Image (tube, grey):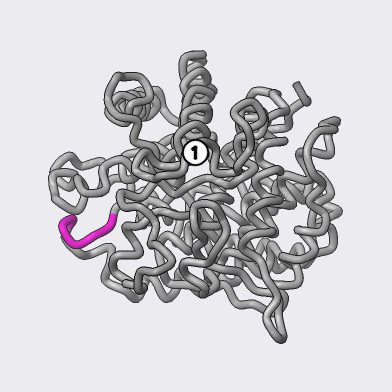
Amino acid sequence: MIPTPQAAEGAGELMLRFAERTGLTSDLPKKRYLWTDAFAVCNFLGLAQATGEERYTDLALRLVDQVHHVLGTYRVDDPRTGWISGLSEQEGEAHPTRGGLRIGKELPERAASEPFDEHLEWRRDGQYFHYLTKWMHALDQVHRWTGQSQFNTWARELAKVAHDAFAYADRTDRRMVWKMSTDLSRSLVPTMGHHDPLDGLITCTQLQTTGSTRISAGPSLREEVADFATMIAGQDWATADALGLGGLLADASRVAQLMHLGAFAGSDLLHALLAAALRGLAGYARQDDPRRPASRRLAFRELGLAIGLFAVELIEKETGTEHRHLSRAAEVQEQIRGLAPYVALGSEINSFWLDPEHRETRAWSEHCDINEVMLVTSLVPAGFLFMPSANAG
């Protein structure tokens, strides 16, 4: 997982260009998008470790601050102003995630009086749970890589408000909303995301496990963990979607690492995640996605799969030693061997999108920020995938 000097240099150049054109290091308009920025924070952390250059850590911290001040407040075209949490300016500075964080879409959220338009909804602002969990992970990684405990506290405050807003009870089950309004007062898309409860369980467990190491501030997430565990019972997470598959493997790497800290003790979750990933990869291999021309491919979705495939090495390392918390150890090792033939696909995806000719298409340029940032994650994956121990700072 250690990048070559050439890979680190190329990744650094891409991230510095991203920082400039999105207004992080320039006077250009601040162009913040929560999913992309979560990966970008992790990339800066990984580059700091790979190069020894402190400027990348500084960029990670600056990006967190800018995201909170842009996406934690109302849009400039919204008649409402201030923190979306409703906190005062001073309280909002101390607790910037207590109202959640906007997605950062190009259009304002749909008004309560407007009819639902599925195509248009993708371009409208609001809050996505699976974007919020990515930001929780990024904040926790900042704590783990720098030792500054307030980032884990902010992540747990975000987890608490997100759970309370997105989770609900219907007549028979506990469920989740897919998309909420900016102020979390109403549902915009009521259907439940396939992996949202799973993301909630793993991320809240991660934050709770991190926060148990001498961090006194912030809420406990024990009730939220229990609720998400109820939601995922009996669920099948297999998918042939490239981005979803990559997410399953990245989640599996987090579970494997957290098990060393006593989380998920006696659980079959790692085995279930790997089983779902194997079924999904078999389905993905039957598709023609990797054989399409660049103009008909979505790079960031494929790069999500590449990132997940690079996590297999980490999963193998974490489960390869004597592991008293590992359930079904022999079966997990067999699953990891089953994943081995697919790992090369990650390098193939990387090589395809590193070719400058393949980045000259409209499909690339329309999603340039997310494509380049996730390409960097695939080149320098440690900042996103590896979870170092951290002393509370």
Q: Residue at x 62, y 56 (%)?
A: 252
* Main SS category, magenta section: helix
- Work out whether residue 227 or residue 387 is closer to the camera in this orientation and state it: 227
Relative to 13, is 33 above or below? below
Give the residue at x 17% y 47%.
358
Q: 324 above or below 287?
A: above
From what the image shows, is residue 370 above or below residue 44?
below
Residue 326 relative to residue 160: left or right: right
Q: Residue at (51%, 15%) from the top-left corner?
A: 52
Residue 177 is situated, as x and y percent measured from the top left of the image, at 56, 68
Magenta stretch: includes residue 166: no
Residue carrying label 1: 73
The answer, for residue 368, to whether it is visible in the render is yes
Give the mark count: 1
Query: Which quadrant of the structure image shows residue 393?
Result: top right
* Vertical placement of residue 297 versus 103, above or below: below
Residue 297 lies in the magenta stretch: yes
- Residue 271 place in picture, x, y as percent: 68, 67
Secondary structure category for the residue under label 1 = loop
Measuring from the top left, give residue 161's x and y in whole percent. Answer: 67, 51
Q: Which residue is more in the foreground, 209 or 351? A: 209
Rendering coords of residue 6 (x, y %): 34, 25
**Would you say residue 42 is visible in this rendering?**
no
* 361 lies left or right of 71: left
Please provide the residue range marked out in magenta. 294-298
Residue at 76 percent of width and 66 percent of height:
227
User: How busy is the neighbourhood of tag 1: few (under 14 within 10 Å), some, or many (20 plus)?
Assistant: many
Amino acid under label 1? Thr
